[in-house]
Amino acid sequence: MLSVLTINHNNSEISFLESFSFNKDSLPHALKQLKQIDGIEECFILSTCNRVEIYVSTKIKNIDSEIIKFISNFHKVPILNKTPITYQFMYGKDAAYHLIKVASGSDSMLLGEPQIINQIRESYKIASAAHVIGKSLHKLIQVSLFAAKKVRSETSLGSRVDSIGSLVTKLSKKLFEDLNNRTLLVLGTGEISQILISNLKTEGLSKVLIASRDIKNAITFADKNNCRPIPIESISDHLLTSDIVFCSTGSPDFLINKKEIERVQEQRAESIMFFVDIAVPRDIDPRVGDIDSCYLYNLDDLKAIIDNDHLENNKNLHEASVIIESSLSSYIQWENSDNVKDIITKMRRAVEDIVEKEIKSVPFQDIDRALVAKRISNKILHLPTKNIKDEASLENSLYLSVLSEIFDLDKDDNDSNVYKIEDEKTFKNRN
């Protein structure tokens, strides 16, 4: 069964979410540790600036407590002690629907924001390299990415040009009358940083400084986006001349603190500084927002602004939901068909074992018992097999569930497939 634990911008504040985020460096180790949990056959972790989601495929129905224990132990944060509890579990069809919805941009803080597609691809690559992805999650992720492409190309949700980068640009224009003589300091070389720089340059801003935890990334990014790379250790030297500061790194600690900005503002004669921190965990000490001349926006603040556009959002979501539902049906049909193959194989093996055992009890010397057993089994199973295949497209196949119960086909392959009726008389006379 597919299960997902999701902590996201819809059910959590940034202060809770950031406690459980995974960065690229920690993700491979986390995935391997998760896969070692008894019963987990496949797993996938999606960790972005506004969501942490753990997907697992397992035969164990009650895996929730193990996932909670895993994420709590990994981050050394007792998630169950948080009040209120700000996470959610989903299962089966609902879990599959959720990932498709996330990929399509329908669950993003800014609806239709395209960055999530690349984030899913990157997380999938990491999970594949860690050898924790199997056929079920592989198929679901491919269906999700295909649905995302359709939403972007065929609906008005996909045609939205809004992004966090464009929203920050709008806020910058409100705070500063003229952007021509302003300096932008960007910490982090992600896609959103690139969009922001492009948008602000269109509005007249010309001076951009870029810093990254890896100076090579900063240099490469600067070459592509015509800005100046600086070592992240030297950002304090450049805060004095920076008007807009945008942060989206994966640093575990604050890169900018309140005392530092207070010193800077004394020298700047308390001129306005605009800070935007979308990093998880946060890059900027939230107390910077307490300084009179400083405007600090984090993900919670941006979400509050975005949530005002309800009518337009509902229209866009309705268009996207048609594609999402169709993609979900496609995945469910594939999943049922795949289950059918396993059930048929196990059922044939079970019947063949029964027939072969019976033939072995007959004192014939000159017959190919295995061949006879297979022929008898095929004749017995021809009609049931046909009916199972016909029912494969149904969401909740009655044949599959009944057969699994009757033949006990969910048991391990190394268990005996010889099924006995212990008390035939009781069986025949049962009500």
Image: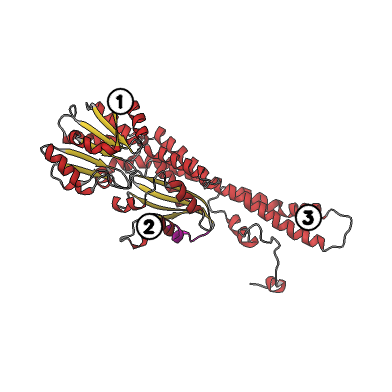
Q: Residue at x 38, y 49 (%)?
A: 52
44 over 398 or under it: above or below: above
> Residue 217 lies in what quarter of the image?
top left
Q: Which of the two discs, 3 and 1, labels the residue nearer the N terminus? A: 1
Residue 64 magenta: yes
Where does the image place residue 342, in percent across and percent down from the top left? 63, 51
Where does the image place residue 105, in percent across and percent down from the top left? 37, 41
Q: Nearer the viewer, residue 171 or 21?
A: 21
Q: Residues within 10 Å of mark 3 (few under 14, many from 20)?
A: many
Q: Which residues are magenta?
A: 60-67
Query: Would you say the residues marked 3 and 1 are in contact, meaning their CB atoms lie under 8 Å apart?
Result: no
Query: Would you say the residues marked 3 and 2 are in contact, meaning their CB atoms lie under 8 Å apart?
Result: no
Identified by mark 3, the residue type is: Ala
Mark whose residue sits in front, 3 or 1: 1
Residue 183 magenta: no
255 over 345 or under it: above or below: above
Q: Is residue 149 visible?
A: yes
State the SS at label 1: loop
Q: Residue lying farthest right? A: 366
Q: Which residue is mark 2?
A: 76
Q: Which residue is mark 1?
A: 226
Q: Which residue is mark 3?
A: 373
Q: Nearer the viewer, residue 37 or 338?
A: 37
Q: Nearer the viewer, residue 69 or 386?
A: 69
Q: Nearer the viewer, residue 221 or 324?
A: 221
355 over 102 or under it: above or below: below
Query: Would you say the residues marked 2 and 1 are in contact, meaning their CB atoms lie under 8 Å apart?
Result: no
Mark whose residue sits in front, 3 or 2: 2
Image quadrant where one finds the C terminus:
bottom right
Q: Is residue 326 visible?
A: no
